[in-house]
Image (tube, rainbow, N blue to C red):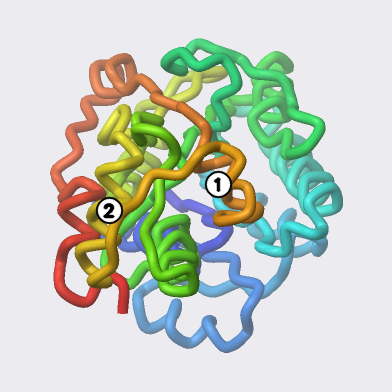
């Protein structure tokens, strides 16, 4: 299959590209960084330089493709409303190009559990005012119009050697700054997690086997107690792990506090059964404890 992959030089996208190529697909990869184009080419990916604002570039990539995997999203959270709008517009562009065909589109989403229960694949959450990304809602709307669109929901921790910008490095930075690796209360807030190599394989399976209008969970571990993660970070950094009250956590973690406090387990049973996905990589605690993980 000829696949157009956005975010091809990113943390997850680069692994998706590698997995697709190994499975015999050809890949055109969108990157917003001209300096990454040469590396993509060396890896066997046809580079296409542009951003989600470049509609003509997105359309060109889509028109030449037999399938699309969309992972690109900006990192400047201060522009979250603008980023969400750009993301939705890009997905709409892909839908326009693929309308009237059976060509698959796989769109990226995530979790912020507000119910306290385990998120299931058939749930259809509303867009949250504080985080207005509407990627999956846009994809499901396309599916309702007959486009073969599906969604991969990534957990808050997509880990692996070389991780620099995810939650674990951010938590480690806080621990270094404060001199302790902290958790809230008893630390039983459950965090879903996946290794990026396992996530990459799920994207490919969703592209090859996924059904229109479905959501798949890239969740290898349905819920890891946050204390276990804090303990692992503490051991790696040689710092004590300590319990904080919710009030203390606000000051300690800053903007990360909402995530540390969130109890967000997520199911993977239906995804595993439907797509034949079997995660094989180390879990988050084992990964964090590997030498050099935190730099």
The residue under label 2 is: 197
Q: Nearer the viewer, mark 2 or mark 1?
A: 1
* Relative height, residue 131 to residue 16 (above, below): above
User: Is the residue marked by circle 1 packed among few (<14), some (14-19), or many (20+) residues within 10 Å?
Assistant: many
Percent x, y for residue 208?
Answer: 36, 34
For this view, does 130 lie left or right of residue 282? right
* Relative height, residue 161 to residue 72 (above, below): below
For this view, does 2 lie left or right of residue 107? left
Residue beneath the point at 35% across and 51% down? 242
Residue beneath the point at 14% across and 43% down? 280
Distance from disc 2 to disc 1, alpha carbons, whole Å, reads 32 Å
Q: Is residue 101 visible?
A: yes
Q: Is residue 26 visible?
A: no
Percent x, y for residue 72?
Answer: 61, 56
Residue beneath the point at 52% across and 36% down? 261
Percent x, y for residue 84?
Answer: 77, 45
Which of the 4 image quarters holds residue 253?
Answer: bottom right
Residue beneath the point at 21% across and 26% down? 276
**Circle 2 sits in a helix, a strand or a loop, which is it?**
helix
User: Is the residue marked by circle 2 packed among few (<14), some (14-19), or many (20+) residues within 10 Å?
Assistant: many
- Give whichever of discs 2 and 1 has the lower sequence position: 2
The residue under label 1 is: 249
Can you say which quadrant of the picture contains the C terminus? bottom left
Which of the 4 image quarters holds residue 176?
Answer: bottom left
Of residues 134 and 46, the one nearer the viewer is 134
Of residues 179 and 133, the one nearer the viewer is 179
Percent x, y for residue 207?
Answer: 42, 36
């Amino acid at each position: 299959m000829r696949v157009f992959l956005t975010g091809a030089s990113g943390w997850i996208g680069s692994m998706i590209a590698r997995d697709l190529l190994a499975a015999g697909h050809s890949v055109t990869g969108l990157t917003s960084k001209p300096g990454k184009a040469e590396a993509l080419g060396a890896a066997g990916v046809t580079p296409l330089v542009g951003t989600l604002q470049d509609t003509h570039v997105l359309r060109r990539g889509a028109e030449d493709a037999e399938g699309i995997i969309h992972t690109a999203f900006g990192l400047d959270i201060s522009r979250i409303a603008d980023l969400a709008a750009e993301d939705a517009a890009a997905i709409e562009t892909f839908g326009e190009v693929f309308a009237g065909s059976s060509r698959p589109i796989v769109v990226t989403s995530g979790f912020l559990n507000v119910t306290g229960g385990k998120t299931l694949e058939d749930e259809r959450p509303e867009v949250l005012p504080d985080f207005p990304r509407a990627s999956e809602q846009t994809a499901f709307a396309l599916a309702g119009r007959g486009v073969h669109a599906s969604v991969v929901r990534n957990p808050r921790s997509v880990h692996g050697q070389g991780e620099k910008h995810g939650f674990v490095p951010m938590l480690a930075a806080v621990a270094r700054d404060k001199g302790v690796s902290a958790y809230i209360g008893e630390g039983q807030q459950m965090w879903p997690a996946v290794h990026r190599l396992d996530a990459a394989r799920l994207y490919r399976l969703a592209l090859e086997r996924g059904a229109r209008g479905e959501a798949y969970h890239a969740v290898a571990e349905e819920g890891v107690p946050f204390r276990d993660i804090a303990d692992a970070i503490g051991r790696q950094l040689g710092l004590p792990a300590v319990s904080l009250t919710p009030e203390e956590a606000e000051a300690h973690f800053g903007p990360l506090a909402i995530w540390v406090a969130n109890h967000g387990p997520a199911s993977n049973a239906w995804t595993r059964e439907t797509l034949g996905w079997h995660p094989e990589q180390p879990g988050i605690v084992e990964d964090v404890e590997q030498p050099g993980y935190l730099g």
